Amino acid sequence: MTTLRILAKGDYLSEVADIHGISITSSSRIVHTVCDAICSRMHNIRFPTDPAQQRDIKEKFYQICGFPNVLGAKDGTLIPIQGMAGVDEPNFVCRKQFHAINVQAIADADLRFTNKVVKWPGATHDVFILSNSSMPQIMEDMNGWLLGDSGYPLKKWLMTPLLNPQSEKEIRYNKAHCKTRNTVERAFGVLKARFRCLHKTGGSLQFNPPKSCKMIGACFRLNNKALKEGIPVPDGENQLQIQHHQHILQQDQPNEGNRIRAQLIQRF
């Protein structure tokens, strides 16, 4: 209960310790022991590899706005953490000028997370996180693609929006892309509504980066568990403002992704 209150409310350890009649030291030890156990025992964040599961996911994404062959929507979000000192401190200051962990994740059409990367400082660029994750290797031979915003590079397995759509088909492609990719932003909204410690309204995680990353990972797993069990989403999910990077990546280099996207646009 101590851990759940910290994760769900974002309260200070001193307040939670008083509520439960324990010391601050004990409450800190409890939180990190429980989060370690959750991360080591709860394995419910898996990217779909089974053909039947992939077909189901593609169909659900297609029903949103007619965008075919989608296996997931990808985005990043910034999780505020406490300030720090030392040589690594500048690496954690994000472009919005607060200390953060830059978290990237993939969600399906049911708002469940199927992949996450929780380890990089807030100043780390989204493209760097993507290229140093397992997803390029996983997606290379997949029959399908991910949807990402204009901060990601266009690849044969990662469809991004057009920066300057001209034709009606290009405009319709961008609209369908936006509505379909929005699932991952909604998923982040649900996550942060359940666990206010991850949202700026809950302050910031008052722990060092490794411990903060463990707490974030526990929240992701518990959120997927809550979705599976049908636990209602707290009120106000749609009002949460999600902090993330807004880089726009110029994509002038022709590649296989351009060819696939051009063919895809003709469907709209």
Image: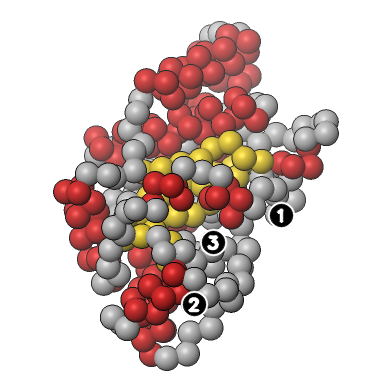
Q: Amino acid at mark 3?
A: Tyr
Q: Residue at x 74, y 51 (%)?
A: 97
The numbered mark at residue 162 is: 2
**How many numbered callouts?**
3
Q: Amino acid at mark 2?
A: Leu
Q: CA distance from mark 3 to mark 1?
A: 17 Å
Residue 258 screen position, x and y as percent: 45, 74
> In the rendered view, would you say 141 is above or below 84?
below
Residue sitting nearer the eye, 48 or 221: 48
Most extreme residue toward the bottom is 167
Residue count near mark 3 (Cα–Cα under 10 Å), binned few <14, some 14–19, many ≥20:
many
Name the secondary structure under disc 1.
loop
**Which image quarter: residue 49?**
top left
Residue count near mark 2 (Cα–Cα under 10 Å), binned few <14, some 14–19, many ≥20:
some
Q: Amino acid at mark 1?
A: Arg
Residue 8 visible, this angle: no
Q: Which residue is mark 1?
A: 95
Which quadrant does the N terminus fall into?
top left
**Which image quarter: residue 191?**
top left
State left or right for residue 40 relative to residue 204: left
> In the rendered view, would you say 217 is above or below 94?
above
Name the secondary structure under disc 3.
loop
Residue sitting nearer the eye, 177 or 253: 253
Residue 212 visible, this angle: yes
Residue sitting nearer the eye, 258 or 239: 258
Q: Which residue is mark 3?
A: 152
Q: Residue at x 36, y 86 (%)?
A: 169
Badge 3 or badge 1: first in the primary sequence = 1
Q: Which of labels 2 and 1 is toward the front?
A: 2
